[in-house]
Amino acid sequence: MGSSRGPYAKGVAKRAEILRAALEVIARHGYRKTSTRELAAAAGLSEAGMLHYFGSKEKLFEEVLRARDEADSARFADEDPIDGLQAVIRHNGTVPGLVQLYSTFSAEAGDPDHTSHPFFVNRYATLRTRLAETIRTRQSEGTLTRDADPDTIATLLIALSDGLQVQSQYNLPTAPADTFSHLLDLLTGPKRDS
């Protein structure tokens, strides 16, 4: 078992190196303007050599998005999930290529037969749960309206975030994070008596 640790560790390190290069290249040049050949070259590999580490182009892009999520989680670790999501939306303005990858790839993976469909199902379920827990906490503290169901608000926040990522590619008149903040302001407003 000890002899397999060396090659395994090297494989893990190479995958991490490929993902770092892919994140940088896609963020800089965009998803549509970057080929897998360019990603491989940035990692010092042939295209076939790079895909060996992931199995397919789809799995590579899934891992790029997973790495993006992990980097965002680390970057905004001190934020609660709602504030963290708002910070991610603001940060996304600096990485339009990754936003383009996410928007396109998540739409493609909506097909249940897509190899990355389970990744997105899990991603959305996890995010929805974390947001709903935070919404419940804010509701109990009185800092968020109690008029709406936490699971519904969580779903709406994710839908708004994803929709803003798509719309950000079409020159929105308002910054996506400001639009998100506006909805949060509406949810924190005082409860109106009937």
Image (cartoon, grey):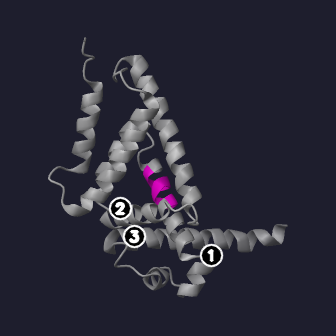
Instruction: Please tell me how crowded label 2 is: few (under 14), some (14-19), or many (20+) other residues with Cα within 10 Å.
Output: many
- Judging by the rendered image, the residue that carries numbered circle 1 is 55
Q: Position of residue 102 (x, y in %)?
A: 41, 62
Q: Give the SS element for disc 2.
A: helix
- In this picture, is 12 found above or below 168? below
Which is more N-terminal, label 1 or label 3?
3
Residue 4 visible here: yes
Relative to 11, 164 lies left or right? left
**Predominant SS of the magenta segment:** helix
Q: Amino acid at mark 3?
A: Glu
- Residue placed farthest to the right in the image? 1
Residue 99 got which mark?
A: 2
Which is more N-terminal, label 2 or label 1?
1
Mark 1 and mark 2: Cα distance apart in space: 23 Å
Q: Is residue 71 magenta?
A: yes
Number of numbered discs visible in the structure rendering: 3
Which is more N-terminal, label 2 or label 3?
3
- In this picture, is 45 found above or below 110? below
Residue 181 got which mark?
A: none
Q: Is residue 22 magenta?
A: no
Label 3 vs label 1, nearer the camera: 1
Nearest the viewer among 110 and 118 is 110
- Judging by the rendered image, the residue that carries numbered circle 3 is 24
Stretch in magenta: 66-72
Query: Quick check: marks 1 and 2 in contact, CB under 8 Å?
Result: no
Q: Position of residue 91 (x, y in %)?
A: 32, 53
